[in-house]
């Protein structure tokens, strides 16, 4: 009942005329920027973050919620019409969505993505409203050692699953932690990594860092790989779904939601795993498996629902624990810190009206997306026809304007350029961006919890293991770090065993069919993959070889 009454108070705040107007503006801005090629929700939120600075916190976060969900919706539009996912979680949507569009069913693909996003987002936000207070009650009982261990787990788990290698992930994390150290030490008062520059004494503003790494870095990277051929945009009619499409979509929507929210709420869960699981599940359960790979509507409905449910799930640890689990949540955490608000266990008690207004605005923004963007789908498709040199020039202009508006200092523009070049080089060498952002945001907080833990134990490192939850988490951390080595050992031993057993089986079979004492026929052999080739297959190989 407390959750219900608090949520009703949040709706009363979010539905005031001015706040409702900000929600509409946020939805339109988020969709307009998110629909542009190459811009995912994280970049959309980072680019538009400075827009909210002139507003008071409640209005700003209501607008921010619209931008967040609008960017998610815009990413699916780009994936379907251009086969250009704005982020990795939209890749699965693009597989079937673009095939549907090329087959003349772009309207149906956009409709099932929009309605699935609405259903999954609504259910996910309802679960957020129910689960977040429960997580808060659990988090309040934790001490500094457990909280430090949880943040270490979040950093390592996210870093370990991103990028093409763990080495690159931890290199990115190291860069983020180094950037987070810049400024004056809050305990000793000493300057760290300021290089004698007084303007660095207060540290690097997280908004400038986020805009530089996401917006400027991505714009420079895409601009460096612009194709000379113009983009081919598939025409879109008014999105609609027939009775058959509804019948094939509603179950994938619900299953995708069930996959998405739990993974989104877990450290390093993200949306990539649930979208892939949703796609595989729908392919197995579909009555039309032959359509997969050619434009199956279930392959759009399920993954898109999983994507948006995961987006709602990421807000649970972000609001309750102050732990972002993906890039978009990291930028949202930056928005909180820019207003001097610290997400975590005390947020619901210290900023209760703001938090519940934010959660209520997620429901409102989700509904507005459905009501506004279905009729406006042809307009968003026309927006995709913008020449990309103009598009990314505009992105750099607004990124520069937004970074300057944070502190009104030209020095921030120098930082923007330097970190933007760093973001470009990270993409060039395959370093994931998210560990850097998490390192910048969580680095100072991890340092604070570590110092508090060591102060409580009089400097004894054993204090890090003084709580049972901390010990359990460190065991999980150890398993995460040791898993690649264990996997390699198991993988190295398994093929050898398989090869030996297959060779023995082949020899036994050949020996039983051949006369006693005769050698095994040369055509009975073990292939490189561990499978036995029979006489007929061997002779067939010889016939087919030119």
Image (cartoon, rainbow, N blue to C red):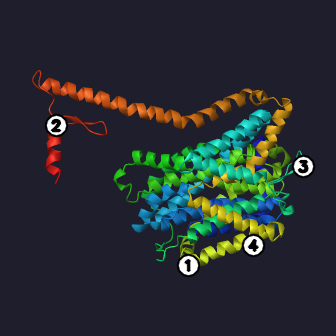
In this view, 142 is above or below 341? above
Extreme residue toward the top, this view: 516
| Residue occupying image coordinates x 51% and y 65% | 84
Q: Position of residue 143 (x, y in %)?
A: 80, 33
Screen quadrant of the C terminus: bottom left
Marks 3 and 1 in Cβ contact (< 8 Å) = no
Q: Which mark is first along the chain, 3 or 2?
A: 3
Q: Which residue is mark 2?
A: 523
Q: Which residue is mark 3?
A: 189
Q: Which mark is first along the chain, 1 or 2?
A: 1
Identify the secondary structure beneath mark 3: loop
Dividing the picture into quarters, in which one does residue 299 lie?
bottom left
Q: Which residue is mark 4?
A: 401
Query: Which numbered dot is residue 146?
Result: none
Residue depth check, mark 4 versus mark 2: number of the one nearer the observer: 2
Q: Which residue is mark 1?
A: 387
Q: Residues within 10 Å of mark 1 (few under 14, many from 20)?
A: few
Give the CA distance from mark 2 to mark 1: 62 Å
Give the CA distance from mark 4 to mark 2: 73 Å
């Amino acid at each position: 009942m407390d959750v219900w009454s608090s949520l009703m108070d949040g709706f009363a705040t979010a539905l005031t005329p001015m706040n409702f107007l900000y929600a509409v503006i946020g939805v339109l801005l988020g969709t307009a920027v998110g629909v542009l090629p190459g811009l995912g929700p994280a970049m959309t939120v980072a680019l538009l973050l400075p827009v909210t600075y002139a507003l008071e916190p409640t209005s700003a976060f209501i607008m921010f919620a619209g931008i967040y969900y609008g960017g998610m919706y815009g990413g699916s539009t780009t994936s379907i019409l251009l086969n250009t996912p704005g982020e990795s979680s939209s890749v699965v949507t693009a597989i079937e969505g673009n095939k549907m569009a090329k087959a003349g069913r772009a309207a149906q693909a956009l409709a099932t993505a929009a309605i699935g996003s609405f259903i999954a987002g609504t259910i996910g936000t309802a679960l957020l409203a129910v689960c977040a207070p429960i997580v808060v009650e659990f988090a309040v009982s934790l001490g500094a050692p457990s909280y430090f261990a949880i943040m270490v787990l979040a950093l390592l788990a996210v870093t370990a699953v991103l990028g093409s290698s763990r080495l690159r992930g931890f290199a990115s994390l190291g860069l983020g932690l180094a950037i987070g150290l810049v400024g004056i030490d809050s305990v000793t008062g000493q300057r760290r990594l300021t290089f004698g520059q007084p303007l660095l004494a207060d540290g690097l503003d997280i908004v400038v860092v986020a805009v530089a790494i996401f917006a400027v870095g991505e714009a420079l990277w895409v601009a460096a790989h612009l194709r000379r051929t113009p983009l081919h945009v598939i025409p879109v009619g008014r999105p609609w779904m027939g009775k058959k499409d509804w019948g094939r979509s509603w179950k994938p929507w619900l299953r995708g939601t069930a996959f998405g929210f739990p993974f989104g709420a877990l450290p390093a869960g993200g949306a990539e795993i649930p979208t892939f699981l949703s796609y595989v599940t729908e392919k197995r359960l579909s009555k039309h498996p032959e359509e997969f790979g050619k434009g199956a509507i279930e392959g759009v409905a399920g993954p898109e629902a999983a994507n948006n449910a995961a987006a709602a799930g990421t807000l649970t640890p972000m609001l309750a624990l102050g732990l972002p689990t993906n890039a978009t949540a990291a930028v949202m955490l930056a928005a909180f810190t820019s207003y001097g608000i610290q997400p975590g266990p005390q947020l619901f008690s210290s900023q209760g009206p703001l938090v519940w207004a934010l959660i209520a605005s997620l429901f409102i923004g989700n509904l507005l997306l459905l009501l506004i963007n279905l009729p406006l789908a042809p307009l968003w498709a026309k927006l995709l026809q913008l020449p990309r040199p103009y598009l990314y020039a505009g992105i750099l202009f607004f990124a520069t304007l937004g970074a300057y508006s944070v502190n009104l200092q030209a020095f921030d523009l120098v930082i923007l350029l330097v970190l933007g070049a760093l973001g470009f080089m990270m993409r060039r060498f395959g370093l994931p961006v998210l560990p850097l952002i998490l390192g910048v945001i969580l680095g100072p907080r991890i340092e604070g919890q570590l110092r508090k833990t060591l102060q409580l134990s009089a400097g004894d490192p054993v204090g890090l293991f003084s709580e049972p939850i901390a010990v359990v988490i460190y065991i999980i951390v150890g398993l995460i770090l040791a898993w690649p080595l264990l996997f390699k050992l198991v993988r190295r031993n398994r093929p050898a065993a398989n090869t030996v057993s297959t060779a023995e089986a082949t020899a036994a079979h050949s020996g039983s069919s051949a006369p006693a004492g005769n050698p095994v026929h040369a055509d009975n052999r073990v292939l490189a993959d561990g499978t036995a080739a029979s006489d007929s297959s061997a002779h067939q190989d010889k016939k087919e070889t030119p």
